Image: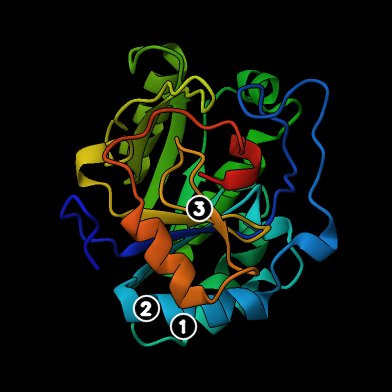
Amino acid sequence: MLDQFGREINYLRISVTDRCNLRCIYCMPEEGIKLIKHEDVLSYEEIFEFVKVAVQFGINKIRFTGGEPLVRKGFVNLVKMISSIKEIKDLSLTTNGLLLSHYAKELKEAGLMRVNVSLDAIDKNEYSRITCGGNVEEVLNGIRIAKEVGLSPIKINCVIQKSTKEKNAIDVKNYCEENELIPRFIQEMDIEKGEFGVVHGGNGGDCENCNRLRLTSDGNLKPCLFNDISINIRKVKYDEAIKFVIENKPACGLSGASHKFYNIGG
């Protein structure tokens, strides 16, 4: 389905949880966060039924995000459910990789096609600092196993402060080159201030060609990350919600105060 600017909307990013097993300094505030109540989080059945309607509007590409999707119990079952929808041609996951070694094989067998792994540093001390205690070896092992089971391509998401010439970015780039992975460098963003940029090595931040919608874990369907336009799919019919956000998708992102990175996903 085309929006009012002639962009074909075929991509849905689904945040399945606002929980995460890391506390990255650019994502989580020091004072902590107020988590969504369990009863307010969409069930897998609700997500499945919504996607079945969304494909009727041309959605054929799904990415699961969080928080960290792999901390939600039974997530592999959701992957299997969505992969059974024949119209879905691209099914992927964004993860911090800590649990990837445990689930990569199951995810592949359930129908997951590819994965993006967040990796902001290779040095163990620097990674621990950025993530507030994370173990980079667990992530690297998860990437290795994901590669072994055939999840492909594997893209590595690295958040940068100002430049791809930063030491952490260079280390990540070298690691990707050595292991036949695809690096993507993402400028640190601020949703409330509307600060974002085009992803180096990807198409994020390219408003003119944006083809995506976002569904938060508590059911808010959004046409843009940097905008407060949304509608809750529990309050209206699914087809009405999809029509609303496509018809109201803005030409370009500005700012958004209703969500943070930790609860809307990557």
Q: Name the residue beneath numbered marker 2.
A: 55
Q: Name the residue beneath numbered marker 1.
A: 52
Disc 3 secondary structure class: helix
Q: Is 115 located above or below residue 243 in the figure?
A: above
For residue 133, the mark is none
Disc 1 secondary structure class: helix
Amino acid tagged 1: Lys
**Colour scheme in use:** rainbow
Q: Closer to the camera: disc 2 or disc 3?
A: 2
Which residue is pictured at 41% across the width and 57% down the height? 245
Which residue is pictured at 44% across the width and 38% down the height? 157
Number of residues whose C-alpha sits closer than 10 Å to that of mark 1, classed few (under 14), some (14–19) or many (20 or more): some
Callout 2–callout 1 Cβ contact below 8 Å: yes
Which residue is pictured at 33% across the width and 25% down the height? 197
Amino acid tagged 2: Val
243 left or right of 219 in image = left
Q: Closer to the camera: disc 3 or disc 1?
A: 1
Q: CA distance from mark 2 to mark 1?
A: 6 Å
Nearest the viewer among 163 and 178 is 163
For residue 144, the mark is 3
Q: Is 234 located above or below residue 4 in the figure?
A: below
Q: CA distance from mark 3 to mark 1?
A: 33 Å
Residue 26 in the image, given as x and y percentages of width and height: 61, 23
Disc 2 secondary structure class: helix
Residue 118 in the image, given as x and y percentages of width and height: 52, 40
